[in-house]
Amino acid sequence: MAAWTWRFEKADGTEVQPAVRPEEFTTQGDAETWLGEHWKELAEGGAEQVSLFEDTSAIYGPMGLGEDSAA
């Protein structure tokens, strides 16, 4: 079964520890829902962008977490 995970980064691509610890998600939708619920806390905690991975494959990103970026 695939594991969906987020990578949290500064704007320059440096990985940072998230302010809210994510789990490994079993579906892309679960991962995206979690991000939608926690993006503001993550941004306030220092993450400026995120990338989504399925196991080790990058699915998309980096995607900004600023309020202007939120859908």
Image: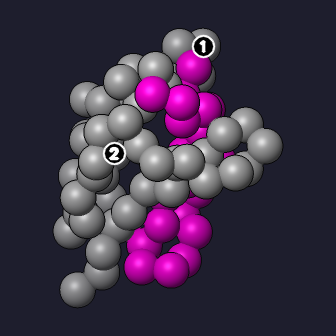
Whole-percent x and y of residue 64? 61, 32
Residue drawn where x is 45% and y is 28% of the image: 45
Reading the image, the residue beneath label 1 is: 68
Furthest residue in direction right, as rendered: 12
Quarter-wise, where is residue 54 in the image? bottom left
Q: In the image, is 30 to the left or to the right of 60?
A: left
| Residue 66 makes an appearance in the image | yes
Where does the magenta region start and end? 45-66
Q: In the image, is 19 to the left or to the right of 1?
A: right
Mark 1 is surrounded, within 10 Å at the Cα level, by few (under 14), some (14 to 19) or many (20 or more) other residues, namely few
Within the magenta stretch, is there residue 60?
yes
In this view, the residue in front, 9 or 56, is 9
Which scheme is used to colour this image of the protein?
A: one colour
Cα–Cα span, label 2 and label 1: 18 Å
Whole-percent x and y of residue 37? 25, 29
Q: Is residue 37 above or below residue 28?
A: above
Disc on res. 32: 2
Furthest residue in direction bottom, as rendered: 1
Q: Amino acid at mark 1?
A: Asp
Mark 2 is surrounded, within 10 Å at the Cα level, by few (under 14), some (14 to 19) or many (20 or more) other residues, namely some
Q: Amino acid at mark 2?
A: Glu
Q: Are marks 2 and 1 in contact (CB under 8 Å)?
A: no
Q: Earlier in the sequence, mark 2 or mark 1?
A: 2
What predominant SS class does the magenta segment belong to?
A: strand
In this view, the residue in front, 11 or 1, is 11
Give SS at disc 2. Answer: helix
Residue drawn where x is 23% and y is 86% of the image: 1
| Residue 36 makes an appearance in the image | no
